[in-house]
Image (cartoon, rainbow, N blue to C red):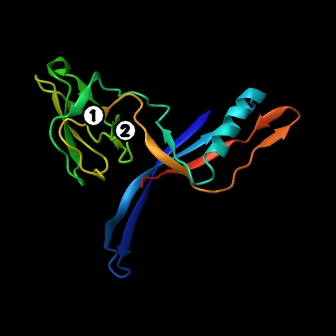
Amino acid sequence: MRLAWGQRRFDLRFENGDSGSGQSRLVAPPRWTAALSCPDALTAADAAVWRALVLGLNGRVNQLALYDLGNPAPRGTMRGTLTLASAASAGATSITLTGGAGQAATTLLQADWLGLGQSGSQRELLAVAADATADGSGLITVSLVSPLRWAYSSGASVVWDKPTALFRQTTDASTWTHERAIRTGYTLDLMESWE
């Protein structure tokens, strides 16, 4: 399987044609994008699994929880049970986590993934913006690539192992091909979706 992962931004840009000066503004929260493609040739059983996945999404009706298949765990060394050490407000660009004293001097590295609200509808997949190291009591303050969409209370669970975002297909059409027992062409173009 091939996975292409990205981010769709919703920025508004104004430029002065005379001076060349410009101004950019975020008009909506960025969303993660993903494109899944099957291998070039599938067995009948594997093709049935792909077909069930594609059809189970019912076009753009149902959501798919997906993690970055190429980065299922942080490159940093922080592991174990992680929680928010303090409340985090919507719009925050950093969060403070704790894993207890056993996490002293562990790290989270730039581009590591973390998840908040992973068991509910306020699920967020967060990318770490800069390397960070936990202090002697296991507290670590992590800067984020994108601001939080929702507020979270102190003690909220933080997922580091395969954190997911919820995706919907970007189109309501699905196709695949069969040619002399070669089954291929299953693809999903997805964009993060929350309600």
Residue furthest top as drawn: 102
Mark 1, secondary structure of its residue: strand
In-front residue for pair 141/168: 168
Residue furthest front as drawn: 120
Q: Which residue is at 67% across, 38% downward? A: 52
Category of crowding for the residue at label 2, using alpha-carbon neighbours closer than 10 angstroms: few (below 14), some (14–19), many (at least 20): some
Disc 1, disc 2: CB below 8 Å?
yes
Residue furthest bottom as drawn: 18
Q: Is residue 40 above or below residue 55?
A: above
Residue behind mark 2: 118
Q: Is residue 41 above or below residue 168?
A: above
Residue 30 sits in quarter: bottom left
Q: Is residue 175 left or right of residue 181?
A: left
* Coordinates of residue 93 in the picture (x, y in percent): 23, 49
Residue 130 sits in quarter: top left
Mark nearer the N terminus (1 vs 2): 2
**Whether residue 170 can be seen here:** yes
Q: Is residue 68 left or right of residue 169?
A: left
In-front residue for pair 109/176: 176
* Coordinates of residue 88 in the picture (x, y in percent): 19, 46
Q: Which residue is at 41% across, 62% downward? A: 10
* Coordinates of residue 43 in the picture (x, y in percent): 76, 27
Q: Which residue is at 18% across, 17% downward? A: 102
User: Which part of the image, by quadrant, shows the N terminus?
Assistant: top right
Residue behind mark 1: 157
User: Which amino acid lies under the numbered mark 2 shown in the image of this protein?
Assistant: Gln
Category of crowding for the residue at label 1, using alpha-carbon neighbours closer than 10 angstroms: few (below 14), some (14–19), many (at least 20): some
**Whether residue 39 can be seen here:** no
Residue 171 sits in quarter: bottom right
User: Which amino acid lies under the numbered mark 1 shown in the image of this protein?
Assistant: Ser
